Image (tube, helix red, strand yellow):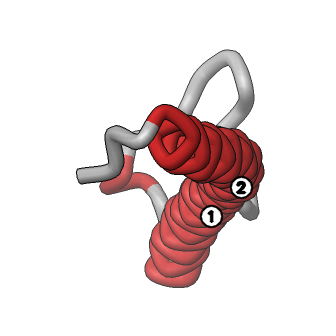
Amino acid sequence: MMQAAADTPIQRASIDQLTFAELESLVEEIQERRMRSQTMYQEALAAKAAIKEKKDRDLYQKRLTQIEKKLDSVNKACDIIAKYMNEVKLLRMTVGDLA
């Protein structure tokens, strides 16, 4: 911002002491600062969303892996149950108690 003759860091000029060009410059600076702040805020929101999306994606993959492992366990258990059922059928036939 351009400083008027009466505008110093210690003794600031009042708005009515600034020229029209200085007022325009002041307004532009304020708008630029606001836009920089807004941009930084939007970037922070995007970064936060990206982190959450990555965490969600990681959790999704973890749950799929857990489901796959549990399904393997269930399949193994079903195979064992089928094996036992066949043994029971054979034993029933052996003892003559097939219903």
Residue closest to the far top: 10
Q: Which mark is residue 46?
A: 1
Element assignment for label 1: helix
Q: Is residue 46 visible?
A: yes
Residue at position x 50%, y 71% in the image: 31
Left or right: where does residue 23 sit relative to residue 47?
left
- CA gap between label 1 and label 2 equals 33 Å
Q: Identify residue for label 2.
A: 68
> Mark 1: which amino acid?
Ala
Q: Earlier in the sequence, mark 1 or mark 2?
A: 1
Residue at position x 74%, y 62% in the image: 2
Q: Position of residue 16 (x, y in %)?
A: 32, 55
Depth check: give the residue in front, 92 or 35: 92
Q: Is residue 26 above or below residue 7?
A: below
Q: Nearer the viewer, mark 1 or mark 2?
A: 2
> Mark 2: which amino acid?
Glu
Q: Is residue 83 above or below residue 32?
A: above
Residue at position x 63%, y 41% in the image: 87
Q: Position of residue 61 (x, y in %)?
A: 73, 57
Depth check: give the residue in front, 5 or 67: 67
Element assignment for label 2: helix
Q: Is residue 51 visible?
A: no
Give the position of the N terminus as an image quadrant.
Answer: bottom right
Q: Residues within 10 Å of mark 1 (few under 14, many from 20)?
A: few
Residue 20 falls in image quadrant: bottom left
Residue at position x 58%, y 58% in the image: 49
